[in-house]
Amino acid sequence: MKKIFLLFLLITGAGAAYTQPLFTYGNKSVDKEEFLRAYNKNKTPVDDKERSLREYLELYIKFKLKVNAALDLKLDTLPQLQYDAQSFRTQIEDSYLSNEATVNNLVTEAFTRSQKDLRVLHFFAGVAPTATPDDSLKAFRAISAAQSQLATGRTDYEKLIAETGPDLIRQSDIGFITVFTLPYEYENIVYGLKKDQVSKPYRSKNGWHVFKVIDERKAIGKWKLAQILTAVPPEQQGADKTLLAKRADSIYQLLQKGADFSLLARQVSDDKLTYGNRGELPEFGSGRYQPSFENEVLKLTRDGEISKPFLTEFGYHIIKRIMHTPVTTDKDDAAYTFELKQKILQDARVNVAKDLFLKEIQKQISFKKTGNVSDQDLFRYADSALWNADAGTGNYPISSKPIYSFGKTKITGSQWLDFVKNYKGNPQLYQQENNAALLEKFVGSITMDYYKSHLEDYNTEFKYQMQEFKDGNVLFEIMERNVWGSAAADTAALHKHYNNNKNKYLWAASADLILFNCINKTVAENAKEALKNGKDWKQIMDESGNGIQADSGRFEISQVPISIDPKSAAGFVTTITVNTQDGSAGFAKIIRQYPEGAQRTFEEAKGLVINDYQNILEETWVNELKKKYPVKINETVFKSLLK
């Protein structure tokens, strides 16, 4: 008995220690779990863990004091801050409305498929929405016959179609595809096939499909390209294209002689979507463009290489390879995994996870069917309500009866009838689903709406993220009122602080410079040459089409990303420095150089003065808050953080 009693004391004692606060401020407290959650989000590798924790604890205490002061002033009730919180909630809530395990499985599946590109042939027999049963049967028989012949290994596709369904079947070469190229339902079929294997007929809303994989290769990744297009006008599709070919070739010859690709794209490209962006296409991978275009892309083996003009149905293209990104083979690549996950969340395949998630949340909210009304009656009165569109939904035998319950909510028959009337009355939503399908949508809608509006009750991470945002919002508001705005507006105090601390506001080695930042080295070289020839730097920037950003002023030499020799004379133009990360390039023209130690004027030092004065105001304010909300740190709990 004594052993049992001792065990009870140990358990209850451990529980009491576990719930002890790390620190208190006024009549509020923070436990170590809350603190560690914040610390671990912001921590970096350290040698001295205790020192790191002490420093962060002091920052976190100041944070909580400021937020508490804001809440005491009821700043969280300001309409703008409430609107911001609701907007943020809307932005993030969808990320909490999915089955994470299923999404992770979809990520793994997408990763595996992304390692291999497949070349696919597509055979299709269309079935119109108005087709008769006989027409539908003809399409099925034709595609089935074609599939049987394809399965034997036949490759004379035109003859095969002529034999099985010349007026019903269309065949196309999709080219190489990768994950996310095709709709998920087709992707599942294709990636379930081996080379030279043929799928069984698959029925979609529009007809019957058969796929054949005729080749496969290791995934080749994604490209970033720019293009100059000499378009074929619609009226010249079948005409002689000799003049267009000569025009494209003349552009190519200019490029061979050193003309700037981005400038020519802006001046002569017929691609209205890209000419204003230096001809750059959005990054793409296998399956995005026609095989004839992709084949020319594959011929470019190095960044910066330019193709000869080649013809597609859209016209003559000249393309420049900007960058090629291979597909990662590392399953632990966090950036690639994140990219795949974002694509999945925007793709139809996420519905797999949503269906499972819906079942999960129905368990969490204790969703129950009451049994007061049968499905047959739900369907019968739904039809009646629809036929009597002008009548209300409150006078049917099922109207006041609860049909489902969850949480503290009861769903009545009239809510179901309202849903049916509204849904079927909206042609953009209604897709001729039957009542059983509509009931499934209704149940999914009401349970998801309830769960979304009570997310804080069911998801701890969401609760914490919302609280962090709200705390950050009121913190910004009170800092603007008490520190940032006050410091910037108190001109007399700023001048006084500057005059009392002039020795803090000295220039390091500095120079009056014209700084150029260009999109690439070629643009930088052209700009440098123009500047040397006497062209005004502002004119050079204006004529660049956003290819150059330039600024003039006095800069500390250590703060500019360009190497400047302190012995360089006025008028000297530096060498070009290329950024290896993005290929941008910069240089500077020196107007005048200054040795270190020169006094900054108030205007030159104003930004530094405001920052220093803000720190003084903040420190004074925090000391006042510590008196108003006395802080006590529980050293025993703090020491437990070090274990």
Image: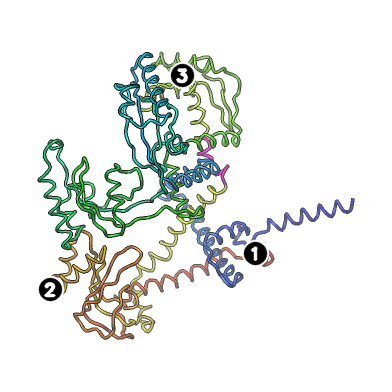
Amino acid marked by disc 2: Gly
Q: Residue at x 41, y 23 (%)?
A: 144
Residue 537, above or below 318: below
Q: Residue at x 42, y 26 (%)?
A: 201
- Determine whether the residue tagged by mark 1 lies in a helix, strand or loop: loop
- Residue that extends furthest to the left in the rendered view of this protein: 243
Quarter of the image for residue 574 reads bottom left
Given residues 453 and 641, the one toward you in this image is: 641
Main secondary structure found in the magenta portion: helix
Residue 324: x %, y % from top left: 34, 55
Label 3 or label 2, whichever lies nearer to me, is 2
Residue 420: x %, y % from top left: 44, 22
Residue 378, above or below 35: above
Q: Earlier in the sequence, mark 2 or mark 1?
A: 2
Q: Residue 393's mark?
A: 3
Q: Which residues are magenta?
A: 450-459
Q: Badge 2: how crowded within 10 Å, few (<14), some, or many (20+)?
A: few
